[in-house]
Amino acid sequence: MLLKTPLQVKHLTLHNRLVLPPMASKTSTADGQVTDAMLDYYRSICAGGYIGLVITEHAYIHMGGKAGPGQMSVAEDEMIGGLTCLADTVHSCGSKVICQINHAGSGTNPNFTGGLQPIGPSAVGHPKKTANVPREMTLEEIKAMPALFAAAARRAKAAGFDGVEIHACHGYLLNQFYSPLTNHRTDDYGGSLDNRLRLICEVIRAVRSEVGADYPIALRLGGCDYTYGGSTIDDAVYACKVFAEEGVDLLDLSGGMCSFSVPGRAYAGFFSDMSEAVKAAVQVPVMLTGGVWSAANAEKLLQKGAADLIGVGRAQLRDHRWAEKALCECR
Ligand SMILES: Cc1cc2nc3c(=O)[nH]c(=O)nc-3n(C[C@H](O)[C@H](O)[C@H](O)COP(=O)(O)O)c2cc1C
């Protein structure tokens, strides 16, 4: 059974192909510190070490990019102590753990950011959350962004995480730069696909230079908006080839402005049209998440070459023993 076979992500050995994808538990303190409630949640869902890889919930890299209440912070060095407890908790269960780092861009409001106005590539709100029209970022602000991601990655590494994941999906900042629906810039950061990838590439380079050559970097891309005028699967294939060349070690695929599901698609692996196309084009491992509720679903997707790793989110959230039951029942 492929699901139970190990996978190498750079120097990181995962004992199977099952992933707990990032899912916001919203259990941090008001200033973003890890809490006992959060540790209990991860201890409960990871018990027994049945999950090969855990990607922790999105952590904000700067107060201006905090998505909402209860979100974990990786924005200050003072967070490293709590983050270390989190990484230790997952490790003690027997899984590897990667920290997802994020800037929400327009996906926030001043109530969550201490009054800071939401920013974005253009003064264009999220097409499905039109309430938040961000302020268009200056070139100076764009140039400062990679260093914020790099500092966050340094903290995650110092805390003992096995890798970092750059969040570029679900309509948050880096996804806003990628999607033509939200990026209307006419300078080097907008227009052509290469220009829309520019900031993400600069973030990857800054993170790599901070964490060193051997440390695994994952990137979660909202590869396709599944919306008229938005990013396409062809864009995702091109972008992922570029990111792999830039040194990303794991490509984790999800939705863009459609967020983590596609309206009208309820089947297991509802992003598999995208992941299959990307997997055929890159050498690095590809992860697919969405709509998987059984080990048989996951196995089928792996067997048909839709991905190398399968994320199972809501099923594991609903039943913290899902991984144990699914892997033990399935031979
Ligand atoms: C409660 C909840 C919180 C989520 N938080 C995040 C997050 O912090 N970062 C992220 O990239 N995706 C997040 N997601 C999306 C999941 O990682 C996953 O892509 C989605 O649930 C679809 O997979 P599923 O059908 O297996 O549940 C969240 C999903 C849920 C249900």
Image (cartoon, helix red, strand yellow):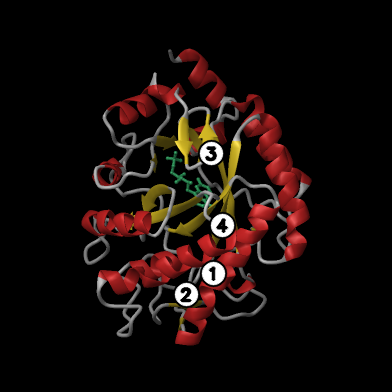
**How far apart in space, not on screen, are marks 1 and 2 (Cα)?**
7 Å
**How far apart in space, not on screen, are marks 2 and 4 (Cα)?**
37 Å
Classify mark 4: helix, strand or loop. loop
**How far apart in space, not on screen, are marks 2 and 3 (Cα)?**
39 Å
Is residue 125 visible in the rendered image? The answer is yes
The answer to whether residue 41 is left or right of residue 23 is right
Q: Which residue is mark 2?
A: 132
Quadrant position of residue 331: top left
Classify mark 3: helix, strand or loop. strand
Classify mark 1: helix, strand or loop. loop
Q: Which residue is mark 1?
A: 108
| Mark 2 vs 3, N-terminal side | 3
Query: Which amino acid, by three-letter code, is at mark 1?
Result: Thr
| Residue 35 at x, y percent in the picture | 76, 49
Is mark 4 in CB contact (under 8 Å) with mark 1? no
Disc 1: CA contacts within 10 A as few (<14), some (14-19) or many (>=20): many
| Residue 62 at x, y percent in the picture | 62, 70
Q: Which residue is mark 4?
A: 212
**How far apart in space, not on screen, are marks 4 and 1 (Cα)?**
31 Å
Query: Which amino acid, by three-letter code, is at mark 3?
Result: Leu
The answer to whether residue 65 is left or right of residue 271 is right
In this view, the residue in front, 186 or 246, is 246
Query: Which amino acid, by three-letter code, is at mark 2?
Result: Asn
- The residue located at (66%, 37%) in the rendering is 90
- The residue located at (31%, 49%) in the rendering is 263
On residue 12, the disc is: 3
| Mark 4 vs 1, N-terminal side | 1
Quadrant position of residue 169: bottom left
| Mark 3 vs 1, N-terminal side | 3
| Residue 229 at x, y percent in the picture | 22, 67
